[in-house]
Image (spheres, rainbow, N blue to C red):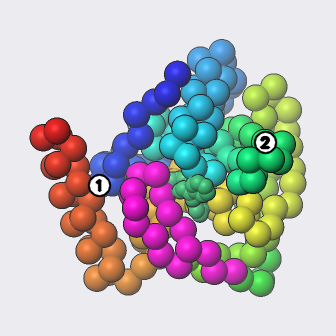
């Protein structure tokens, strides 16, 4: 089932999300619905608060090439264990901030631990777009958006555009 994605500004996108204490069928269904919503958008990641659920759950799949095999990852309680000193810049977007893009600098590689949909503990080092995306999604779980890395004036400009967009969407 496709889920509606919250648009910034929304107080739920500013909250620190709660750890998931135990997996349940409801949470597994939520993760599958988030993947469906992400692929449909289309996007390469999605965090639970973006669909109004304040739990530490993200989904990612950075395989953009349609000929390659998809690699959907469901991550409960994802945690960054280590970050590289090397940095990389990527022009980020966000499904909660449609049609707005800006350069964000982040560590080029990160080691991440998480619990998968079967309850298994996982650990993997990500680099490139995967590292950027996982960091962007974990930021969502801490109430942080990519525009929080921008200068205040640029952030305000984007926020004003989103307020206007939400007003127009409510009228339509
Ligand atoms: O969290 C989100 O809002 C999803 C976001 C993730 C992301 C994008 C870019 C850098 C870091 C994290 C998106 O997926 S925006 C859409 C997007 O980037 C994309 C869409 C289709 C093909 C390729 C990329
Ligand atoms: Zn986002």
Quick check: marks 2 and 1 in contact, CB under 8 Å?
A: no
- Can residue 79 be seen here? no
Q: Give the prevailing secondary structure in the magenta stretch.
A: strand
SS at badge 1? loop
Q: Kindly indicate the quadrant of the structure image that contains residue 157.
A: bottom left
Query: Mark 1 CB in 8 Å range of ligand 2?
Result: no
Mark 2 nearby-residue class (10 Å; few <14, some 14–19, many ≥20)? few
Residue 116 is labelled as: none
**For residue 99: magenta?**
yes
For label 2, the residue is 70
Q: Relative to residue 140, is residue 160 drawn left or right? A: left
Foreground residue, 31 or 76?
31
Query: Mark 2 CB in 8 Å range of ligand 1?
Result: no
Residue 166 image point, x, y percent: 22, 49
Q: Relative to residue 13, is residue 129 drawn left or right? A: right
Residue 117 image point, x, y percent: 76, 29
Q: Which residues are magenta?
A: 88-103
For label 1, the residue is 9
Image point 57% across, 49% down: which residue? Answer: 43
Image point 55% across, 46% down: which residue? Answer: 42
């Amino acid at each position: 089932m496709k889920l509606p994605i919250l648009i910034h500004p929304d107080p739920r996108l500013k909250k620190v999300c709660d750890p998931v204490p135990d997996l349940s069928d409801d949470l597994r269904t939520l993760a599958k619905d988030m993947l469906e919503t992400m692929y449909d958008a289309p996007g390469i990641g999605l965090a639970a608060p973006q669909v109004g659920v304040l739990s530490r759950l993200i989904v990612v799949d950075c395989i953009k090439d349609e000929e390659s095999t998809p690699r959907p990852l469901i991550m409960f309680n994802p945690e960054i264990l280590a970050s590289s000193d090397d940095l990389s810049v990527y022009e980020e977007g966000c499904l909660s901030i449609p049609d707005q893009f800006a350069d964000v600098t982040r560590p080029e590689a990160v080691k991440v631990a998480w619990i998968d949909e079967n309850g298994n503990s996982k650990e993997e080092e990500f680099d490139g777009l995967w590292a950027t995306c996982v960091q962007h999604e974990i930021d969502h779980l801490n109430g942080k958006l990519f525009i929080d890395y921008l200068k205040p004036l640029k952030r305000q400009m984007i926020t004003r555009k989103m307020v206007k967009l939400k007003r127009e969407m409510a009228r339509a």
